[in-house]
Amino acid sequence: MTRRYVMATRNAHKVDEVSRILQAAGAHVELVPLPTDAPDVAETGATFAANAMLKARSAAEFTGLPAIADDSGLCVDALNGMPGIHSARWCGQHGDDAANLELLLGQLAETPALRRDAQFVCAAAVVDPVHDTEHIVEGVLEGRLTDAPRGEGGFGYDPIFIPHGEQRTTAELTAQEKDAISHRGQAFASLAPLL
Amino acid sequence: MTRRYVMATRNAHKVDEVSRILQAAGAHVELVPLPTDAPDVAETGATFAANAMLKARSAAEFTGLPAIADDSGLCVDALNGMPGIHSARWCGQHGDDAANLELLLGQLAETPALRRDAQFVCAAAVVDPVHDTEHIVEGVLEGRLTDAPRGEGGFGYDPIFIPHGEQRTTAELTAQEKDAISHRGQAFASLAPLL
């Protein structure tokens, strides 16, 4: 039986990506988008996990449905793990991928290739108000940053991130290749059996 | 006898501030600015101290004079200590105080008052090619960040930084008040007896 979950995000890319990952993982779920009149959630947590849980709880409370949420970002070693939980609003405004990416490259302009290691991190949360359960899992993808964007796929910082063992950026991988290794792929594949 | 040092910076604010601090500390030194044809130094160090030393060595080598350098920045707890060594080029371009400050406030827009602790840190280096000596000292000023800029004094992030025990930002203090407590004041006061 297919069960309906609300996905606590306004990012259409994330809904597509998570739907694809859960389907590939064999989860029989239907993801519905967050209602447009759902309240904005202040992401005041200090970690990906805390913010994912804040978003999932808010969506579950508003809709009465079980809710899935994702909080993810890019952690750059040379920036002490930043942008981290601030990834989506690194340029000071929420969700401007091009500005975030350009800013990060500018900040790292003097950082040599050997010090450009980074990780994509994803915390995936599910809150079920019917069964009164909460779960949280994390996935990590290790890699390094390029000097300039490459590739048309993915979103966010994908065009400047090369996973370890790859020559291509995550924006140059196919969706299936990316899902198989990505932070979000790992997190939601771990979550799938719990849904 | 007054001894001449080259100050390894192109920031006129820093030359003024350091001259004032050293004079108040009783050091008999004359600071001369970095010659305009001096080479740019790639600040590739991972710490304030490493970058201050890179700048001082380069200036001493180019001029043959003993050289003083400063590397300083703002370390924000909620950003894992960033902007840190990237403070002067946080917006992606070097030395645009207004853009750096606006960006930082935007990044911290969802960070509540209780989590806005920060430190100003300064590493001060002196390299003397005649006596073949190198010294490095650090100063730290603890405080917290405001939501909006206040005050006309100082430079850099001064308008959004309130030292612990103060109600005013470092841009609202007099130069003498600021020097008495600041990261740069502490560092160069420690350095003064070595000059």
Image (cartoon, coloured by chain):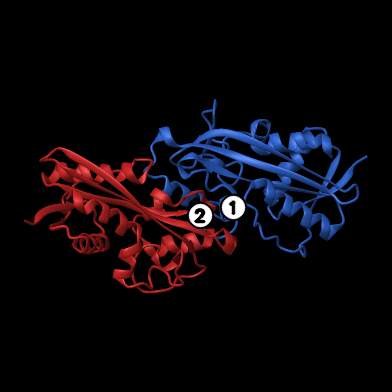
Chain colours: A blue, B red
x, y percentage for residue B50? 32, 41
- Amino acid type at image mark 2: Ala
Which label sits in the foreground, 1 or 2? 1
x, y percentage for residue B83? 44, 52
Classify B152 as above or below A113. below
Q: Nearer the viewer, residue B4 or B46?
A: B4
Classify 10 Å Cα crowding around label 1: few (below 14), some (14-19), many (20 and above).
many
The residue indicated by pointer 1 is: A88
- Furthest residue in direction top, as rendered: A165
Q: Quadrant of residue B140?
A: bottom left
Q: Is residue B116 left or right of residue B10?
A: right
Q: Chain of mark 2?
A: A
Dot 2: what SS?
helix
Q: Chain of mark 1?
A: A
Q: Is residue A65 left or right of residue B49?
A: right
Q: CA distance from mark 1 to mark 2?
A: 10 Å
- Furthest residue in direction right, as rendered: A1
Q: Is residue B42 left or right of residue A190?
A: left
| Residue A99 image label | 2
Residue at x-position 66% and y-position 41%: A122
Count of numbered labels shown in the rendering: 2
Classify 10 Å Cα crowding around label 2: few (below 14), some (14-19), many (20 and above).
some
x, y percentage for residue B137? 30, 47
Residue at x-position 63% and y-position 34%: A174
Residue at x-position 18% and y-position 62%: B23
